[in-house]
Amino acid sequence: MGEGKRNYQQCLGVPFLLYSSGDGKLFPCGAFFTEKNWDKYLMGDLTKDSFKDIIKSDRYWEVVERVRKMGVSKCYTACRTDQINSFLWKLKHPPEHVNFVTLLSGFRHIKYNIQKWEKLKTISIR
Ligand code: SF4
């Protein structure tokens, strides 16, 4: 991974955006697709388990936590999860003077994604 400038120190957005390889393997990030990372970052295999079972599994949450603890100093610039991380970090570490309009717009975006996710988790991909 290359270096990127970010306004957050942890990847908190994994539960909001997953990455799937062409053969159905689910990862928290596109940077982990290579086989050498499977032990640590493979969340599940859609050819073997349903999406619902994967995101409810202990393994899924272990990987979410591993990525959160890893930090982002070596992450590549502007990954797809960047805006989600930026918003969640501000939510967790609010600045002294919060820009209310930006925060409200971020809340709406996250709420929309949660609604989409709620619908999605009822669908079995098997
Ligand atoms: S590049 Fe870093 S911040 Fe982006 S999804 Fe991957 S681990 Fe998270």
Image (spheres, rainbow, N blue to C red):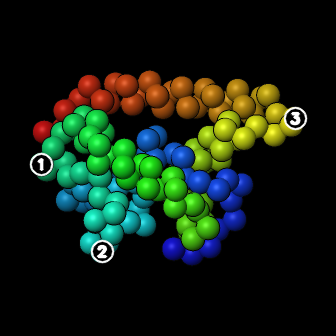
Which quadrant is the C terminus positioned in? top left
Q: Does the residue labelled 1 lie within 8 Å of ligand 1?
A: no
Q: How far apart are marks 3 and 1 (CA)?
A: 48 Å
What residue sits 82% from the left and 34% below the top?
Answer: 98
Q: Distance between the residues labelled 2 and 3?
A: 44 Å
Q: Image check: 57 left or right of 80?
A: left
Q: Image check: 112 left or right of 88?
A: left
Mark number displayed over residue 97:
3
Residue type pointed to by label 2: Lys
Q: Image check: 20 left or right of 95?
A: left
Q: Is residue 80 in view?
A: no
Mark number displayed over residue 118:
none
Q: Is residue 32 above or below residue 43?
A: below
Element marked by disc 3: loop
What residue sits 44% from the left and 41% below the top?
Answer: 15
Q: Where is residue 12 in the image (x, y as percent from the top left)?
A: 54, 46
Q: Where is residue 17 in the image (x, y as percent from the top left)?
A: 44, 45
Element marked by disc 2: helix
Q: Nearer the viewer, residue 91 or 19?
A: 91
Q: Is residue 24 above or below residue 74?
A: above
Residue type pointed to by label 3: His
Q: Distance between the residues labelled 2 and 1?
A: 20 Å
Q: Of callouts 2 and 1, which one flags the residue occurring earlier in the amino acid sequence?
A: 2
Residue type pointed to by label 1: Lys
Q: Position of residue 94 (x, y in %)?
A: 76, 37
Q: Is residue 94 above or below residue 1?
A: above
Which residue lies under the disc numbered 2?
Answer: 36
Q: Image check: 104 left or right of 113?
A: right
What residue sits 65% from the left and 56% below the top?
Answer: 9
Crowd around label 2: few <14 · some 14–19 · many ≥20 (10 Å): few
Which residue lies under the disc numbered 1?
Answer: 48
Q: Of callouts 2 and 3, which one flags the residue occurring earlier in the amino acid sequence?
A: 2
